[in-house]
Amino acid sequence: MVNEISELEYVQKFKKAEQNLHAKTELFDLQTQMKGLQRDAVLYRKIGKMQAYKETSHAAQKIEKQLKKDPLVQQYFLMLQDVNDLVQYVTGEIEGKVNASLEDDE
């Protein structure tokens, strides 16, 4: 079953989108920078440095917008949604069969 799922066209497209995304290391560098700014913003807010919080939070949001506009990121998340839907469906089917089996054993 796993092999059959991995051979589905949209799963293959997702894998390709993931490979393309991983090949573009500058996106991961931006993501790392954004996460660092977000951590700093939380710290600044906790210690009451509101101006520093606003500046770092704004910088993190700016990077996030830049990442979301990247075509590779957009393609990846579009494909991810399709694969996630498949995972939810398969999980539901397995859960249903397990529950039915448990009910039969009672």
Image (cartoon, grey):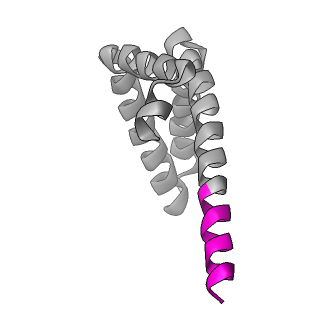
In which quadrant of the rendered image does the C terminus lie? bottom right
Question: Image point 52% across, 62% down: which residue?
Answer: 46
Please tell me which residue lies in front, 38 or 2. Answer: 2
Tell me which segment is drawn in magenta. Answer: 94-106
Question: Image point 52% across, 24% down: which residue?
Answer: 8
Question: Image point 36% across, 33% down: which residue?
Answer: 32
Is residue 84 visible from the viewing direction of this image?
yes
On the image, the x and y values in percent for residue 50 come to: 58, 49
Please tell me which residue lies in front, 1 or 42. Answer: 1
On the image, the x and y values in percent for residue 89 come to: 66, 46
On the image, the x and y values in percent for residue 36 come to: 39, 40
Give the overall secondary structure of the magenta segment: helix
In this rendering, the answer to whether 64 lies above or below 52 is: above
Would you say residue 99 sits in the magenta stretch?
yes
Please tell me which residue lies in front, 78 or 56. Answer: 78
In this rendering, the answer to whether 79 lies above or below 3 is: above
Would you say residue 9 sits in the magenta stretch?
no
Please tell me which residue lies in front, 81 or 34. Answer: 81
Is residue 73 visible from the viewing direction of this image?
no
Tell me which corner region of the image, top left, top right, bottom left or bottom right, holds residue 37.
top left
Farthest front residue in view: 104
Farthest bottom residue in view: 106
Tell me which corner region of the image, top left, top right, bottom left or bottom right, holds residue 103.
bottom right
Q: Please state if 38 lies on the left or on the right of 106 as rendered.
A: left
Labels in figure, total: 0
Question: Image point 66% across, 38% down: which residue?
Answer: 85
Farthest top residue in view: 71
Tell me which corner region of the image, top left, top right, bottom left or bottom right, holds residue 79.
top right
On the image, the x and y values in percent for residue 104 come to: 67, 80
In this rendering, the answer to whether 63 lies above or below 3 is: above
